[in-house]
Image (cartoon, rainbow, N blue to C red):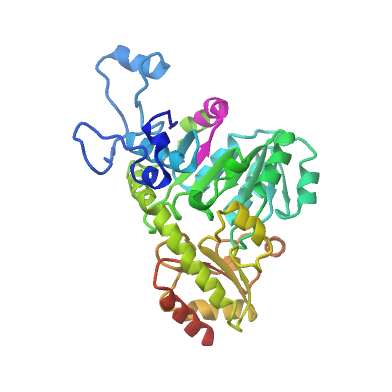
Amino acid sequence: MTTDKKASDNWRAATRSVRGGTARSGFCETSEAIFMNSGYVYETAAEAEASFDGSGPERFVYSRFANPTVGMFEERLALIEGAQYCRATASGMSAVWNALAASTKAGGRVVGSRALFGSCEFILNTLLPRFGVETELVDGTDKDAWEKALSKPADAVFLETPSNPTLEVIDIAFISELAHKAGAKVIVDNVFATPILQKPMELGADIVVYSATKHIDGQGRCLGGAILFNDKEWHDEHLTTFLRHTGPSMSPFNAWVLLKGLETLSLRVDQHIRNATALAEFLTEQPQVSRVLYPGLKSHPQHELAMKQMSGRGGGLIAIELAGGKKAAFSLLDNLKLIDISNNLGDAKSLATHPWTTTHQRVPAEDKIAMGITEGMLRLSVGLEDIDDLKEDLLAALAV
């Protein structure tokens, strides 16, 4: 879906989140309709032929290619992000894989930041090399390492900022400048920051990917992903063909759920941040917690960069380290009464996970250590509950 010049171009962010992309049917419904269908009919055989060869008016031909409900989600998210194009996918990992696969080929080269979600690390370290793509991972905060890695030509650069789970913040503008000199497209996984806090394309990135499963849904209901960009040539010659023939399409029902999520995304993210900021400050005062990683704290290694890139706010995720290692981490998780143990994030409910044994379980131990993940680390996705209830729950669990 591409966003054309229209009245919505003049709308402000909150209005775009509620009304962007809305395309009412002949029934004039208030809420967006769910077009839960796979195919479309034609008046004549000639009309079908013209629809498939592109000589006729643009229309829907098959929901693997495009669907009205999915199209509304794509247009709304593109308006919020400030992108010309958005393509929805079945999951966040589908978005990551398709963005990378459409950006490189056998004999190509991809450079990535080392601090990655476990499945992203698998794609770069294991999957892409199987298809003849050279990959190199570097310390995302080491500018010299980036300069060295990008002194050679590359097809793509992939990074998460803030990273999962250590909340490492990477300088998007600096990396983008280097990458473009090397001939690479910059792909940024923006899921932790959301489009509310950070717009990577304004900082020089070429492609932004999301797991819409996270904050965009925000209530643990469905899976979804999105790829956003401005390059029409890349869209027409690479991504569209790849998506059409591999079929990672989003369900219309999921698109409808995610449309509803976009309506309240800004409001929810604001509250996530208020709670996370208060909780991070609270956790720094607890003797059982040896380290708190939160971009909004001045103690964060990249605090100044985070405030510059992320609209002056720290986001809704916190990482903590417990001095007692895995035993202490498991004890805290097992004694929580309000916060749930779950590997999801961006939910209205506060969630906690132990990355060493869950999201990054299959990453070799030495690689986890290199990423900054320890056995005593927990990742907290701070929800929308009353902040005092969250503090009391953590305090009681830490005291056991």
Identify the residue at the far bottom of this view.
400
The x and y percentages for residue 14 are 39, 48
Location of residue 35 (image quadrant): top left
Residue drawn at x 66%, y 56% is: 305
Identify the residue at the far left of this view.
27
* Image: 289 above or below 73: below
The x and y percentages for residue 371 are 68, 61
Q: Is residue 181 magenta?
A: no
Q: Is residue 400 left or right of residue 265?
A: right
Residue drawn at x 62%, y 63% is: 166
The main secondary structure of the magenta stretch is: helix
* Image: 97 above or below 218: above
**Is residue 192 shown to the viewer in this render?**
yes
Residue drawn at x 76%, y 54% is: 142
**Is residue 109 shown to the viewer in this render?**
no
- Return the residue nearer the eye: 54 or 204: 204
The range drawn in magenta is 227-240
Q: Is residue 153 left or right of residue 63?
A: right
